[in-house]
Image (cartoon, rainbow, N blue to C red):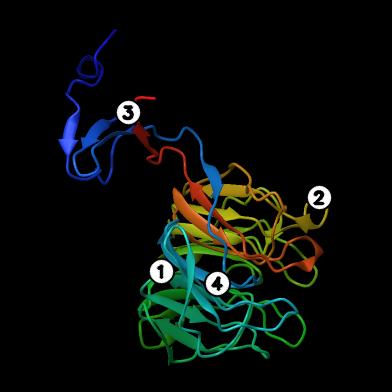
């Protein structure tokens, strides 16, 4: 039988902590925990059940960099009332932290677990409010130029975000507006090619994606890519979808999941699509046995994402959390002698 060194070209390393980015097939001895570990790697992306939110809600927003580091804020609780609640996730449990300054659902936001921005929404009426998160509390900062709900958002932290699309009530008035946040003020920049609301958006201020959405009579598969100056139409998503969750680092890599599927018939969706900068590809469906959710939120990247909340069958506000591990991401296994 071949030895590990013959296969890998090196002996099993002795390390005081697990390597931060192990390659697939790598094996090491963790001298701190006194166990042998290895990276099995993933051949396909998969969803796993995470810890439940403390309060079920839909049309909430989220921010975070991975499946183990995120916050959830705002949203509509059972009965449809807007909420100011904020919860923080550590990879196992959600903990209630400081509330938003204004209770609202149908809002957008992005950033990290310790530096995020919440903007827009429905209070009612439409809100232009912007709240900045510093890891412990929300501070009200300058309003958006146009109050709207069901908008999309992208951003790296509370100093750099993008707001786009949305609806201005009363009625259904889809917008193509885009606004850029510099840490102090919102500035109107290049419009979308297609006015819509209920969009799926991800990325950062200078590199974002807007996909799907609808207006009062049409539903869209359109995808547009933002380069800090203008939006360009790129390849469509696979089906007409709105109100889904998202995760993604920029306009070359991201994930959309759940929401409402308008093709061929209107229904809650459990479908997942991955964007590689050129094309969309269907991935493993959301795993929750209760079925699909609409108006859910998400955070993270194309390889390490999280989705939470939403409205399930019978109009129940969900507490469910699901964690995504993308294809090729490290999966650490501990070896035993049994």
Residue 16's place in the image compared with 172, above or below, is: above
- Cα distance between the residues tagged 4 and 3: 37 Å
The answer to whether the residues at label 2 and label 1 have Cβ atoms under 8 Å apart is no
Where is mark 4, residue-wise?
Answer: 61
- Cα distance between the residues tagged 2 and 1: 35 Å
Please state, as top left, top right, bottom left or bottom right, where the C terminus lies in the image. top left
Neighbourhood count class around disc 3 (C-alpha, 10 Å): few under 14, some 14–19, many 20 upward: few
Of marks 2 and 1, the one in the foreground: 2
Where is mark 1, residue-wise?
Answer: 228
Foreground of the two, 77 or 266: 77
Q: Is residue 65 left or right of residue 34?
A: right
Of marks 4 and 1, the one in the foreground: 4
Residue 238 coordinates in the image, percent (x, y): 66, 48
Of marks 4 and 3, the one in the foreground: 3
Q: How many marks?
A: 4
Q: Secondary structure at mark 4?
A: strand
């Amino acid at each position: 039988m071949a030895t590990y060194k013959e296969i890998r070209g090196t002996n099993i390393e002795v390390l005081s902590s697990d390597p931060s980015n192990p390659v697939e097939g790598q094996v090491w001895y963790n001298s701190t925990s006194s166990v042998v570990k290895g990276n099995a790697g993933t051949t396909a992306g998969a969803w796993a059940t995470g810890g439940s939110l403390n309060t079920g809600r839909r049309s909430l927003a989220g921010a975070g960099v991975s499946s183990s580091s995120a916050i959830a804020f705002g949203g509509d609780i059972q009965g449809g009332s807007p909420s100011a609640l904020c919860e923080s996730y550590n990879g196992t449990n959600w903990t209630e932290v400081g509330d938003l300054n204004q209770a609202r659902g149908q809002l957008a936001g992005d950033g990290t677990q310790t530096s995020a921005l919440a903007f827009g929404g429905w209070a009612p009426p439409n809100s232009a409010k912007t709240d900045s998160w510093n890891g412990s509390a929300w501070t009200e900062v300058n309003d958006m130029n146009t109050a709207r709900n069901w908008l999309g958002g992208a951003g790296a932290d509370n100093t750099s975000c993008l707001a786009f699309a949305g609806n201005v009530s009363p009625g259904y008035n889809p917008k193509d507006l885009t606004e850029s946040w510099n840490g102090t003020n919102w500035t109107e920049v290049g419009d979308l090619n297609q006015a819509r609301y209920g969009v799926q958006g991800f990325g950062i201020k200078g590199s974002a994606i807007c996909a799907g959405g609808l207006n009062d009579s049409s539903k869209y598969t359109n995808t547009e890519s933002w380069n800090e100056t203008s939006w360009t139409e790129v390849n469509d998503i696979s089906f007409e979808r709105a109100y889904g969750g998202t995760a993604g680092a920029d306009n070359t890599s991201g994930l959309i999941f759940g929401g409402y599927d308008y093709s061929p018939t209107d229904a809650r969706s459990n479908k997942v699509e991955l964007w590689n900068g050129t094309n969309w590809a269907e991935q493993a469906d959301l795993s929750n046995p209760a079925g699909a959710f609409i108006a859910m939120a998400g955070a993270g990247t194309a390889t390490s994402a999280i989705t939470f909340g939403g409205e399930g069958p019978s109009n129940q506000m969900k507490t469910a959390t699901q964690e995504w591990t993308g294809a090729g991401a490290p999966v650490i296994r501990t070896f035993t002698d049994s």
